[in-house]
Amino acid sequence: MIRHPYRAKRRTLLTGAAGAATLGAAAACGDDGPAGTADDPIEISFEWWGDDVRAGLYTEAIELFQQKNEGITVQTNFADFPAYWEGLTSRMASRDLPDVFQMDYSRLRQFGSNGLLLPLEGVVDTSDYREGFLETAQLDGELIAVPISGNTLSLIYRSDWFEEHGIPTPEPGQSWDDYKATIAELTPALGEGKWGGGDWCGQYHFMELWLRQQGGSFYTEDGTALNFEPAQLAEWWQLADDLHADGLVPPVETTIEWTTGGIPQDLLGSEIGWDNFMANYSPSVAEFGGTLALAAPPTLDPSNLGLYLKPGMQLVISATSEYTEEGAKLVDFLQSDPEAIAILGTNRGIPATNTGMENVEVDEYAQAVLDYEASVEQYLTTPPPAPPAATGAIEVKFAELYQQVQYAEMTPDEAAELFFTEAETLFAAEQ
Amino acid sequence: MSASPSTAAPSEADEAGAPPTRGNRGAAKRRSSAIRGGERFAGYTFMLPWIIGTAVFTIGPMVWSLYLSFTDYHLIRGGDWIGLDNYTAMFDDPMFARAVRVTLMYVVFAVPIKLAASLAVAMLLVQRRRGIGFYRAAFYMPSLIAMSVGIAIVWKALFANGGPQDQFMSWFGWEGGGFIGNPSVSILMLVLLSVWTFGAPMVIFMAGLLQVPGELYEAAEVDGAGKWHRFVKITLPMLSPVIFFNVLMETVGAFQLFGPAYIIGGEAGAPAWSTLFYTVRIYSLAFIDLRMGYASAWAWVLVLAVGVVTLIMFRAAKSLVYYAGEDNR
C-alpha cells in the first residue's frame, strides 16, 4: 500500500538497464556491430553523480567530444550521489556497468577487486598527471582509475569572525587542544545560537586523520580488518565531551535537524572538512557577508599532520566494455583537452592533469584551495591503500553508533565494542 | 467477461453472451462448470499480462529471496548455502530486537489511533450537508501526498526545535524540544503522519456506514436509545466486518511501513535508532551492507510474523465480527 518512491525508481532503472542490455545483445547478434562512422556510430555510455549544473557542463563537453570524434556517440546519465551508487551497486551484480563512469575512492576496491574495472596502463594517457595523483588510482599496484581532481583535509573557518574576535590565524601544527581552546573562545563571543566549531567525532575520515597522526591507520594494509583498538575508538568518541558539556559545540538535537552544513547556514565558525568544500560553502557565506579561509587541521604531532592527497573523483572504464578504445578517448578528452577543461572548470575540483591546471579558469575560491594545498604540501604523506569494499557500510555504522553515544543511549565503550562486532561481520561477509 | 470470437466457437459465444441473472444462481453455476477448453484458453490469455507480471515481479523474486535467505549471499561476492545460519544469527543480533521493538510500538500506537480517527471522520462525512463532497476530498487528500519528499520537509519543519509542535507543547510545560531530535518521542512523528493519512480506511468506513439500515436507528430511537447506545449497539456491530477488514489491512500495512520512516529517519533510523523500523533495517542490510542473504532472512521472518498475526486476527474475528444475514442461514 505504501510504497517507497526510490524503490520504484530502482526497478525502472533496472528494467531500463535490462532492456538496454537485451537490445544491445540483439544488435550485436544482428550484424558485425557498428562501423564507427558518422552513419553507423559506435555508442558508448558515460555516467556520473552530480547536480544539474554539473550535468550541463558535462553535456556541453560531450557535444564537443562528439564533434571532434566523428563516429562515436556518447549516451549520458546522471544521478545524485546516493542514488548513483544504489543504481550502480545493483547493476554491478549483473555486470551491467556503463562504459565510462565516475568513481569515488571509497568504492574503488569494491568495484576493482571484482575485476569490474579495466586496467588503464597503456590504455589511457598517463603522462600528464600532477605528482602524487596517480598513487591513489591504483589497486594492489595496478592502475584502474584516473583522478579527476584531488583534495585533502583542512580546517575551514570564518576568517572574518576569527579576525573580529581577535583569534589568531590557525597555523599548521596546532594541537587538538589549541583548536578546542579556539572554539571555547569563539562560541561565547558569537552569542546565542552560533558556535565556534562543530563536533567532529562522527566522521571516520577524521578519526583516520587522528590515527595517522599517531603513525597508525584506520584499516590494515590489505584492507581486511580495522587497524586500531576499541579503546582508541572510545577515546576518539570522547574527544568533544568537554565541549558538549560546556555547550561550546552545537548539540546533536540541533545538528540532526540541519539539512545542510553549519558553515553555509552562518551558524558555525569552523569545521574540519575536505578543502574543496570551501568552494561550495563560500557563495552562501558571502551572502551573509562573511569570508572563509583554509588552515591545516589540528594534530597530535606538529611534524605529522596525517594529511594525504585523496582523489576527489575518478574516472574508470568498465572491464566489460566492448569499446575500450573509444572509452579511453573520452577519458583522455575529459582529462586533458584544453577546450574540455575550459568548459568543465573547477566544478569537480582542481584538475589533476598539468594541461588541466594550465587551462582551467581559477576563481578566488579555487585559488584559496590551491594556496592551501601548496602550504601543506610538505606535510602530505603516503595515502592509505584504497579502503575495503565494506567502507561505505562502515562509514554509516560509525556515524550511527556515535549518535548513540551523543544521545547517551550507549557509553563510548559499548558503542565501540558494537562497532567492532558490526565491522567484523561486514568484513566476514565479504570474504 | 466474454470470449473473443477468434478463440470461441459461435455456439459457445452465444452461451457466454447471456449474462447470469440474479436469482438464477443454479443455472449460472451449471454454466460456469461447463466452460469449455476454448473459453478457458481465452480467459487465461486475457489474464496473461497479470500472470506474467505476478510470476516475474512477485512470485519469482519471493522464491529467489527465500532461497537467498539460506545462503550468505553478498551483492558482489555471491554466496553459498549455509542452511539456517541466517535465522539463528538474527537472535544474537542486537539490531533485531531493536527493530522489532520500534515496529511493534508503531503498530500498537498507529493502528488504533488511525482507525478511531478515520471512523470518527467517516461518521461526520456520511451526513448530508452542503459541500460535503469538498470535505470528503479534503480529508482524503493527505493520503495522496503522504509519501512525497515535500511532506517529509513539512514534517521536519513542524517537529523541529522551536517549531509549531515544540511551541505548542511548551505552553503545557513540555521541555523535550522538537520530536525530530528527541529519540524517546520521535516515533510519534510517524504515528501522526499515519493518522493524518487515514483516507483509505475512512472511505471504507463511509461505505460501511451507508450500508447500515436506517430503520435500525429509527427503531432504537423509538425505544429511547441515546446517541452513544445507538453507536455501541447498532453502528459498531453492523460495521464489525468493515472494522475487521480495516484493522487487518492497517496492521499488515503498519508492519511493513517503510517509505515515511526512510524519508524522515534515513537508513540509520535517526535519531539514535528510534525510527529504525524493521523494513528500514532490511533495506540497509541489503543495500548498504550488501548482505542480501541475511536481509532476505529478515524479510521472511517478517512475512511469517505478519502471517501469524493475520491468522490470530481471523481466529479472533470468528467471535467478534457480526455478519448480517449469517444467522438466517
Image (spheres, coloured by chain):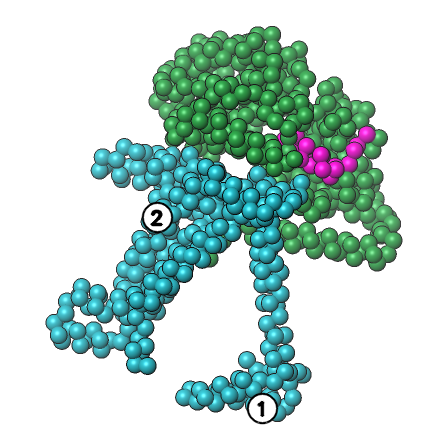
First in residue order: circle 2 vs circle 1: 1
In this rendered view, identify the residue nearer to me: A214 or B263.
A214
B218 in relation to B61, above or below: below
Query: Which three-letter amino acid code belongs to the residue tagged 2?
Result: Leu
Q: Element under label 1?
A: helix
Residue at horizontal 58%, vertical 34%? A426
Q: Where is residue B306 in the image (x, y as percent from the top left)?
A: 44, 55
Query: Which three-letter amino acid code belongs to the residue tagged 1?
Result: Asp
Chain letter for the cyan colouring in the rendering = B
Q: Magenta segment range?
A: A103-121
Quadrant position of the C terminus of chain B in the picture: bottom left
Which hue belongs to chain A?
green
Q: Can residue B234 be seen in this view?
A: yes
Answer yes or no: are tags 2 and 1 on the same subunit: yes
Residue at horizontal 61%, vertical 80%? B40
Query: Is residue A271 toward the left or the right of residue A348 in the image?
Result: left
Query: Is residue A64 toward the left or the right of residue A174 in the image?
Result: right
The count of marks equals 2
A96 in relation to B203, above or below: above
Residue A110 within the segment the image draws in magenta? yes
Q: Residues within 10 Å of mark 1 (few under 14, many from 20)?
A: few
In this rendered view, identify the residue nearer to me: B283 or B299.
B299
A72 in relation to B145, above or below: above
Q: Residues within 10 Å of mark 2 (few under 14, many from 20)?
A: some
Residue B14: image tag:
1
Question: Mark 2 sits on what residue?
Answer: B192
Q: Where is residue A268 in the image (x, y as percent from the top left)?
A: 45, 23
